[in-house]
Amino acid sequence: MRKLLLPFTLTLAASLPALAQSDSAQAEDATAVFAGGCFWCMEEAYDEIEGVKATTSGYIGGEKSNPSYQQVSRGETQHVEAVEVEYDPQAVDYATLLQAFWHNIDPFAENRQFCDSGPQYRSAIFYQNDEQKNLAEKTKKELEARFGQPIATQIIPANQFWEAEGYHQDYYKKNPIRYRFYKAGCGRTDRLKEVWGDQAGLPGSK
């Protein structure tokens, strides 16, 4: 009997690491990258969503390595301001993050968002896999049908995301007065209400 049980015991033991790896993979956080104009504002919107674990302001979409804010803001690198969202897919799905993205941008604006103009402020969804791509394209088509006009937002495969300088991270928390003046003066809130009505900002920043 011991000889019969031994191979089974070894087989079970050998399978345990694989099972543990599988459970670990299911519990891993996921990331999504969205460009919606000023990354300070997009951080605020996503930080309010349950299941989002972290947001990082940064640059994506260009070819220059480790671009600076000055280079990007002058339109020298082809990068856009963007936010990288780290989230728990067991608590919030990508479709909800997409909804927050749309409701926090002006989807009709080309090469600008609100008071910030230039291709470095264009709206874009940077997908990391086919599921993200398909969901992004599906929602874009639904919005075009809803509004009866083209949506300017680009849907692009993600390349290297470069973290922005430290003073940009959590700017709305560290500099609340300056941030509120900027956001109000930029016309972001008013334009979002004009486009989205009661859905403006939801399910993120209100």
Image (cartoon, rainbow, N blue to C red):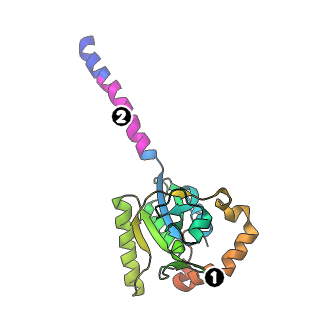
Counting residues from the start of the chain, the first of labels 2 and 1 encountered is: 2
Residue 151 counted in the magenta span: no
Left or right of 131 in this view: 152: right
Q: Between label 2 and label 1, give the one nearer the viewer.
A: 1
Judging depth in this view, the residue of 42 and 123 nearest the camera is 123
- Using a 10 Å C-alpha cutoff, classify the residue at mark 2 as few (fewer than 14 neighbours), some (14 to 19) or many (20 or more): few
For the residue labelled by badge 2, is the local secondary structure a helix, a strand or a loop?
A: helix
Q: What residue type is labelled 2?
A: Ala
Q: In this view, does 201 lie above or below 67?
A: below
State the count of labels: 2
For disc 2, the marked residue is 18
Left or right of 46 in this view: 125: left
Q: Mark number for residue 187? A: 1
Quadrant in which the N terminus is drawn:
top left
**Residue 103 drawn at (x, y percent):** 52, 75
Judging depth in this view, the residue of 131 and 5 nearest the camera is 131
- Taking the spot 71% from the left edge, 73% from the top edge, the residue there is 180
The Cα–Cα distance between marks 2 and 1, rounded to whole angstroms, is: 53 Å
* Residue, far bottom: 148
- Taking the spot 23% from the left edge, 16% from the top edge, the residue there is 4
- Using a 10 Å C-alpha cutoff, classify the residue at mark 1 as few (fewer than 14 neighbours), some (14 to 19) or many (20 or more): few
